[in-house]
Image (cartoon, grey):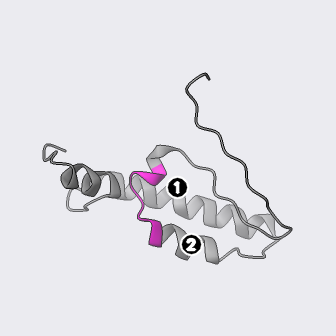
C-alpha cells in the first residue's frame, strides 16, 4: 500500500470505466480495448456491458496464448532491449 500509485479524476453519468488486471493490459492492444469499450458507451443494459467485459477477457486469454502475436508487453520489452520474451 505504501508504494501504490493513486490518482483521482472526475466522472460523469454515462462514463464507462475499464478496471482490469495487467493480464488484460499486457496482452490486448489499446485500440482493441477502445473498440470494444465504444460498444457500451452510454449503455445501461448490464447484459450488454457484461458481454463486452467477457469479450475483453476472452481476447486477453486468447492473445496471451497466441505465439505469433506481438503483445503490448512484448513490444515494450523489445523496445527496451529485452528480446527473450
Label 2 neighbourhood size at 10 Å, few (<14), some (14-19), many (20+)? some
Q: Residue at x 52, y 55 (%)?
A: 57
The answer to whether residue 44 is seen in the rendering is: yes
Instruction: Say which of marks 1 and 2 sits in front.
Output: 2
Residue contact between numbered discs 1 and 2, judged by CB atoms under 8 Å: no
Q: Is residue 17 left or right of residue 43?
A: left
Q: Quadrant of the C terminus?
A: top left
Q: Residue at x 64, y 39 (%)?
A: 6
Residue extent of the magenta highlight: 24-31
Residue behind mark 2: 36
- For numbered disc 2, what is the local secondary structure? helix
Q: Tell me, yes or no, whether the highlighted magenta stretch contains residue 28.
A: yes
Mark 1–mark 2 distance (CA, rounded to whole Å): 11 Å
Q: Quadrant of the N terminus?
A: top right
Quadrant for residue 51, please give it: bottom right
Q: Is residue 13 left or right of residue 65?
A: right
Q: Residue at x 38, y 57 (%)?
A: 62
Label 1 neighbourhood size at 10 Å, few (<14), some (14-19), many (20+)? some
- For numbered disc 1, what is the local secondary structure? helix
Q: Which one is in front, 41 or 52? A: 41
Residue behind mark 1: 57
Amino acid at each position: 500500500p505504501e508504494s501504490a500509485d493513486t490518482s483521482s479524476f472526475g466522472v460523469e453519468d454515462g462514463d464507462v470505466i475499464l478496471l482490469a488486471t495487467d493480464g488484460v493490459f499486457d496482452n490486448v492492444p489499446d485500440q482493441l480495448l477502445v473498440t470494444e469499450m465504444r460498444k457500451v458507451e452510454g449503455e445501461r443494459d448490464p447484459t450488454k456491458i457484461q458481454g463486452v467485459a467477457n469479450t475483453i477477457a476472452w481476447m486477453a486469454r486468447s492473445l496471451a496464448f497466441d505465439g505469433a502475436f506481438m503483445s503490448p508487453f512484448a513490444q515494450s520489452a523489445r523496445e527496451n532491449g529485452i528480446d527473450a520474451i
